[in-house]
Image (cartoon, rainbow, N blue to C red):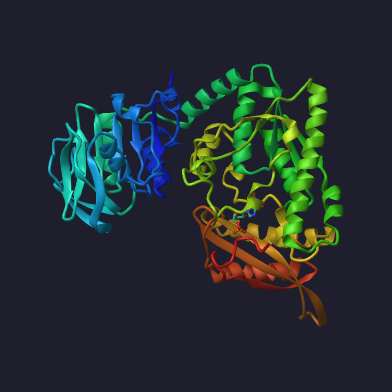
Amino acid sequence: MDTQTIVILDFGSQYTQLIARRIRELNVFCVVLPCTAPLKEIQSYKPLGIILSGGPSSVYDPDAPAADPKILDEQTPILGICYGLHYIVHHLGGVVRPGPKREYGDAEVTVENAATPLFAGLPPRLQVWMSHGDEALELPAGFSRTAVSSNALAGIANEERRIWAVQFHPEVHHTPLGPQILKNFVFGICGADGDWTPAHFVETTVAAIRAKVGKDHVICGLSGGVDSSVAAMLVHRAIGSQLTCVFVNNGVLRKNEFQSVQKNLRDKLGLNLVAVDASERFLSKLAGVTDPEKKRKIIGNEFIAVFDDEATRIARETGGVDWLVQGTLYPDVIESSSVKGPSQTIKSHHNVGGLPEHMKLKLIEPLRDLFKDEVRRIGRDMGMPEEILSRQPFPGPGLAVRILGEVTADRVALLQEADDVVVSEIKAAGLYTKIWQSFAVLLPVMSVGVMGDQRTYAYTAAVRAVHSEDGMTADWTPLPYEVLKRISSRIVNEVRGINRVVYDITSKPPGTIEWE
Ligand code: XMP
């Protein structure tokens, strides 16, 4: 059975992901494609409806982003939002011009055609969020106005052609009845059933992977985090032992992590998992290195080398490896396929784990249409342990970017202990899943202390806890004093080698989440 899908064409709006999120909240599946996606690709989803996002451009700019105008002739219901409305008007023979006044922020809209199914059940006046400079001056033949703001036209429709559009943004929080408008489009106009469930996704994805892979062999680099684990689990469901997962101990994992990941993924979930303890290999390469970027590069390159060795060995044993599983998520896809090109703000160091060209592996990315919270739902549906699903993000270069100065086995052990105190106290206080990341950092700063009657001279640990939506910006978390007090006293008492604890109260920007 085909999954009922709404296709969202992205014209470069900062709100496109929000549209997708609102649609998924209705238990309706959707995908975002760049507006330049070929008609064939759009049609391959057999979309129930197409939403044209907003965007920062003007339709009359010479390089204005454009979709294939044939989508407007398909009788597939269309909803244009902001730039999407201009695009429709412009391509069907109407006129769009810069408006006399930019309309930005809260606005009130009057519904003029209450009978239009897009506005079913809504009051005659709506609070909405506007953000546009252009306006539609003349409508194309067959279109009529459905709503108006004090400044400009706010909604149009051509019901015969099954096209609706609004000038405002129904997807943002500042349009309180926006969800109802999207609901009217998706259910009332497109006829969706709202039956998209994790089980549905697992079933269709597993079948698709099975059909794609056939008898080939597949490998997956596991980090123990949510994304790679759920991706591996889906492939495991599809092809069982044809999948080999590789989990590398890079010497900078957290306390007991090498063992607990194996226990969860191999023992509990039955994945075919090869665990490679390469700590010495990594630590010897890191010896004497203090520059943060050098550390990152060494770990990234060494990971590729270890993974390459394993893949070669697995290929020898299995007669060849053709596919690589990656836990790419939907926000990653949008970042890299945006019409504006890859975002400037992504740091290159976040892409550790890129693999050498010569491997020539084809990619399986079963999560590339999903958000993180949906990945968790899917993991839960497959019975995966909460320990994996609710794990806070952990960077590829691990504790190495939390040990300032040289990374040695001793320092790793010190930080592992201090970090374990932070994490276990945060968990005990019931805060772990409410915080984006919480961890300890080992500073190369030594200071004097006193314990019993003894003078101490030892290292400093910094405690970091931040709230964030996506890691791009973050606020430091005001942890309760009681929790800070327990963390501090336990670290100083239990971790020999650390005699001082400080709390990091820097947000991002201007700080970063990791110290290096
Ligand atoms: P920063 O330190 O840049 O981190 O504020 C933002 C988010 O990204 C994580 N992070 C990484 N993740 N490889 C990763 O997989 C990396 O090299 C890396 N560096 C930072 C960080 O933990 C935070 O969630």
Q: Residue 3: x, y in percent?
A: 43, 24
What is the quadrant of residue 209 in the picture? Answer: top right
In the picture, the quarter occupied by the N terminus is: top left
Tell me what residue is drawn at x 28 percent, y 43 percent: 86
Please indicate whether residue 180 sits to the left or right of residue 349 in the image: left
- Viewer can see residue 102: yes
Locate ligand 1 by image quadrant.
bottom right
Residue drawn at (83%, 60%) of the image = 408
Residue positioned 39% across, 32% down in the render: 7
Query: Where, quadrant-wise, is the C terminus in this rendering?
Result: bottom right
Residue 385, position in %: x, y?
60, 39
Residue at 77% from the left image edge and 38% from the top image edge: 307
> Where residue 275 sits: x, y (%)?
78, 38
Camera-nearest residue between 198 and 263? 198
- 102 horizontally vs 496: left or right: left
Is 19 left, or right, of 511 in this rendering?
left
- Residue 399 or residue 456, whichever sits in front: 399
Q: From this viewpoint, is residue 385 visible? A: no
Q: Is residue 49 above or below residue 155?
A: above
**Picture layout, residue 217 above or below residue 409:** above
Where in the figure is residue 293, as x and y percent of width and height? 72, 58
From the viewer's perspective, is residue 264 above or below residue 447?
above
In the figure, 126 relative to 509: above or below?
above
